[in-house]
Amino acid sequence: MNEERLGNENILKLVVRMALPAMLTMAFQALYNAFDSLFIARYSSHAFASISITQPVINISLAISAGLGAGMAGCISRYLGQRNKKSAEDGFKTALLSALLIAILIALLSLLFSNSFVASFTSDALAIELGSSYLNIISICFPFVFLSTIIASLFNSHSLSLYAMLIQSSGAILNIILDPIFIFYFDLGANGAAIATALGYVFSFIFGLILYKRRSILSLKGAFSFDVLKSITNIALPSMMVSAAGSIVGLIYNRLILSYGLDEMAVYSMYLKLESFMFLASSGISSALVVIVAYNYGSRYFKRVKIAYFTSMLLSLAIMLLGFAFFQIFTKQLVMLFTADDKLLDMGLRAFKKLSYCFLLTSFNISTSGLLQGLGKGERSLILTMTRFFLLLIPLSIVLNYFFGLDGLYLSYFASDVLVLPLIVIIYKITIKECLKTKE
């Protein structure tokens, strides 16, 4: 069986084999986000800044979706490691129904409050209209996003990462094709980008459903179980909180940056679109780590758990260091992908160089969170996340912005990563010590 490779394949080969499809999937998603932004920025910088205000809401929704998928994959992998297929099927059914209900609720809330949300950040009437309209179109398709993520995560839990990649990248490819058609040919601007994205979400779900029906893995015969939902939540909550906390920080950042004007907001959004290539690659490695750790922990292969953690961390660190070097060397070329305006170019050079320092240390946090989620130690991952974002990053962003302006604000991510390192070491040592006691 494919899942048995999780317990006996060479760790380096297994991490690369599982992480690569996930990384490619993330890369496709980042690519269509970048194309989305590139086309809108060239259509209108005002429209680009307007829809950027809504991005934290969309990111929070995607974070919940990804968290549920990771939680389900971790639980199913552990159950399969314990040779408990019944509980694995219950996990799939529980995650699927929960995802659908949550997606519908988020979509309704987003539709009801989109206008008020955008208006809380800007008084610009056109920006409010463009931003709320964009968010409304995207929100309608949230159920398709959640369901396709659950199906993709099911394949991941069976070490069938290629199928997961095909599901999630298919919609991204369609989005890239449709973007220029709706934005420029039909002259729909930001709404055209939203329609292209929404159609991509629907296509991913349909394609995922077709693959699921053709590939015999877990059936839908399982039952909804609150006990299983609790296990899924234990793994999912930290992952959700990591991304959701990032989005909450994004809201605060948006408010701080908008005090410098819409142009600065546009520049920051340009950076975020390109930054996602680096962070989503590391997240892809982390998602593979969750499944590998969960299976081997369930099978009591504790040595493989430790090796997988350090292997994943080193791979992630290598990618982030390359990303930092690339952003420092090719800053001008990166900014010019979005704009040729001299004013925005100067602002972008300053922002990109400072912001990219956050690449240097973030791998330690991402990999440790993946390890803790795979071990079912969700509360510790949550402590790590809350400390980094709410006790360190948010206060630092406000204080550094006050004393050093934009330069201080842009370096606050890096400062928080430095300060959270001792906590990462402490949590890791305590967790590994407990694993060794379990082995005895």
Image: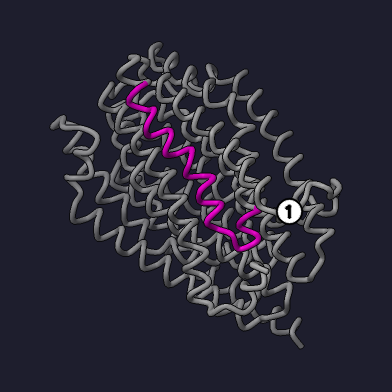
User: Residue 389, how many percent across, how many down?
Assistant: 52, 51
Q: Is residue 129 left or right of residue 72?
A: left
User: Residue 263, how many percent across, how many down?
Assistant: 27, 28
User: With respect to residue 289, does 385 lie above or below?
Assistant: above
Tell me the quadrant of the picture where the C terminus can be found.
bottom right
- Looking at this view, is 272 or 92 the one in front? 92
**Range drawn in magenta:** 154-181
- In the picture of the structure, the residue carrying the numbered disc 1 is 232
In the rendered image, residue 261 lying in the magenta stretch gets the answer no
Residue drawn 29% across the image and 59% down it: 324
Q: Quadrant of residue 5?
A: bottom right
- Magenta highlight: main SS: helix
Residue drawn 30% across the image and 33% down it: 38
Q: In which quarter of the image is residue 307?
A: bottom right
In the rendered image, residue 176 lying in the magenta stretch gets the answer yes
- Looking at this view, is 44 or 117 the one in front? 44
Residue drawn 49% across the image and 32% down it: 200
Mark 1 crowd level (few <14, some 14–19, many ≥20, 10 Å Cα):
many
- Outermost front residue: 214
User: Residue 405, how many percent across, how many down?
Assistant: 30, 41
What is the basis of the colouring in this image? one colour
Q: In this view, does 287 lie to the left or right of 225?
A: left
User: With respect to residue 67, does 256 lie above or below?
Assistant: above
- Outermost top residue: 125
Q: Is residue 342 left or right of residue 288?
A: left
- Outermost left residue: 342
Tell me the quadrant of the picture where the N terminus can be found.
bottom right
User: Residue 363, how many percent across, how many down?
Assistant: 44, 64
Q: In this view, does 140 lie to the left or right of 42?
A: right
Report the amino acid beneath label 1: Ile
Residue drawn 28% across the image and 51% down it: 354
Q: Is mark 1 on a helix, strand or loop?
A: helix
